[in-house]
Image (cartoon, grey):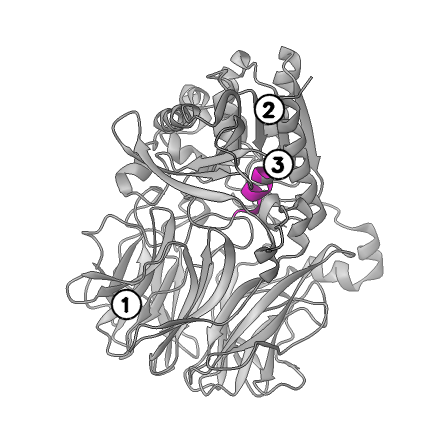
Amino acid sequence: MSKKKRLIKAKDLYRFQLATYAELSPDGRQVVYALQRVDAKSQKTYANLWIAPVVGGEPWQLTVGDHVDSLPRWSPDGSRIAFLSNRDAEKQPQIYLIRFGGGEAQQLTDLKGEFAEVSWSPDGEALAFQFRKKDQDAIERETEDKKKELGIVAREIDRVRYSLDGKGYLPKERWHIWTVDAQSGKATQLTDHAIYDELRPCWAPDGKALAFVSNHAQDPDLDPDRQDLFVMPAGGGKARKLPAPPGPKPLHSWSPDGKWIAYVGQEGCGLWYKNEHLWIVRADGKEDARNLTARHDFTISAFTLNDTGSAKLMPPVWSKDGKRLYVQVSEHGSTTLRVVSVKHGNVEPVIEEQGVVGCFNFDAEQQTLFYFHGKLQDPVQLWVLDMASGATRQLTQLNAWLDEVDLGEVEEVWTKGPDNNHLQGWILKPPRFDPEKSYPSILEIHGGPLGQYGFYFMHEFYYLAAQGYIVHFTNPRGGIGYGETHAGAIWGGWGDRDYADLMAWTDYIAKLPYIDPARMGVTGGSYGGYMTAWIIGHTGRFAAAVTQRCVSNLISMWGSSDGNWVFQLPFGNQAPYQSIERLWESSPMKYIGNAKTPTLVIHSQNDLRCPIEQGQQVYVALKTLGVDTGFIVFPDEPHGLSRVGRTDRRVARLQHIRRWFDRYLKADRD
């Protein structure tokens, strides 16, 4: 007789082990990956490096210790691994090198600041990286006792974008390109402009040049999407701008022969809903960039949402012969891997299984493809694909404890929206579901809005289902995954077609025989928090609501968010002093006087994306209206509490959500 499975708990967040980044060795025999864990006593998150053999053998641990080892990168000959670690200074990571066979890791750099985008030169003699120096006054506060004791006297701010959620106030220094000698550890700064950030250095195949992205607008903070590709000598010197349309360019890579650079990007500035396409441009700058996927209505991204470790969008990967490019595509609730013909732009599937493909890469001969894959009932595993046979093999058994848990069953549904548009959604039924019973339900609304829910593990959803709720979610217009028209449908004003889609989906759910329409709840965070606040001002059909890290007043949010003025873009691109009426028309606070739904407000004190005053306004309004409400504030946490917050606070958040819905949606409530 099989053992009865248990239900998932909020405190299971402590048990997850999550692979954050990985690479296949050049010979295709080993995968190095960073494995993240939580220490319940200290509430700290640590990560160490592990090795997974591709053929035979169990994964084994390469580095140990209570610190964070991340971003492992194989040297071109496979003998060494470069990685970032804070093992010698908790608040100051450095680049380290370790031999593949093990031994003591050697510190390579000794710099004060932030590292990103570390990569080996093709000959293995150096590494390039993106680095932002720590401001001198911050260094002095750390090293001089008196200044450390007194702390900051005043901040002098002279730029528009001066803060970032999860980081706080930004340093005056900008991101620049550096290299470091892999033997001596001598670091060299290659770029040094006062207001230009130089990002994502990428080596040419011959090691003689570096490509990078930068915004050379007169004031990049006032034109943040005007990014361009540049090429400069690997030893430093004058950079050449390549002829590519202005617009965001998050990732790029060189062709094997060094003649072309492929990049992912949008055409145009300030139009976030537009598809991210695959482009190529000649490295010598003699031809304009060419859009390879222009005739395909999909977006190159890895923005399928979950709460246990997001997928990483990877640069385009060239085939060895330079004829094809591998990219991730987010569509219909999945992030898949596809290959694009350079000559014709034809697209073919590589990994089309439902779920999410995260980081991926090949061995040197491209005989083996390694990739992360997450599914609805499994956050992530490491897989390899044999390119000749098409056979796949799973290398890890992470979070095997989930086999002991009854998560319930998920049903995918396609239905029609109010304008005869297609709506895809999912219905999660509680463990031990009885179709003869009548259940309370919770509508979950995703953030973004340019994201998508789908075939990806959501601990929050399973936890609420384990409490006896039908949890349902859909991708209304305004999100990605269904083409540019779908994504752009709410550009110019939220709360119209997206609200109509959510109500049409709710109508569908309410008619199901096992749903109690009198016991329906709604929740969401960020844009989902916006829609929750919008919903309670426009309908009383929900018996309870929880709005999290919400946007409620677009007028007061203007200039106070870390995005400050850019949040005017989806609402006619006018500041409050130009058109206060348009921003107010799309603000949930305009309609809050209609609210009667008992609503819990959850916000993080250090949320710089949607400042806490956004939640405060909703709470105070509901209080003055006499509507049942509560306000939960999490200190020291950023906007992304539900994904990256301290684990005890993430647990408490779930428990507060459950408590609120239990109070108003359970049949035996007072």
Q: In what quadrant of the picture does the C terminus appear? A: top right
Query: Label 2 sits on what residue type?
Result: Leu
Describe residue 296's horizontal placement relative to residue 530 as left or right: left
Q: What element carries label 1?
A: strand
Counting from the top left corner in percent of width and height, residue 196 is at 46, 57
The residue pinned by badge 1 equals 325
Numbered label attached to residue 665: 2
Query: Label 3 sits on what residue type?
Result: Gln
The residue pinned by badge 3 equals 467
Mark 2 vs mark 1, CA separation in Å: 50 Å
Mark 3 vs mark 2, CA separation in Å: 11 Å
Q: In what quadrant of the picture does the N terminus appear? A: bottom right
Numbered label attached to residue 286: none
Look at 50% across and 15% down and name the residue there: 540
Of residue 647 and residue 288, the one placed in the foreground of this image is: 647
Number of marks in the image? 3
Chief SS of the magenta region? helix
Closer to the observer: label 3 or label 1? 3
Counting from the top left corner in percent of width and height, residue 427 is at 44, 37
Mark 3 vs mark 1, CA separation in Å: 45 Å
Query: Label 1 sits on what residue type?
Result: Leu
In the image, farthest residue toward the front: 1
Look at 67% across and 66% down and name the residue there: 92
Look at the image and tell me whether residue 277 can be seen: yes
Counting from the top left corner in percent of width and height, residue 198 is at 45, 62
Look at 61% across and 50% down and name the residue there: 5
What stretch of residues is rendered in magenta? 458-465
Q: What element carries label 2?
A: helix
Q: Earlier in the sequence, mark 3 or mark 2?
A: 3
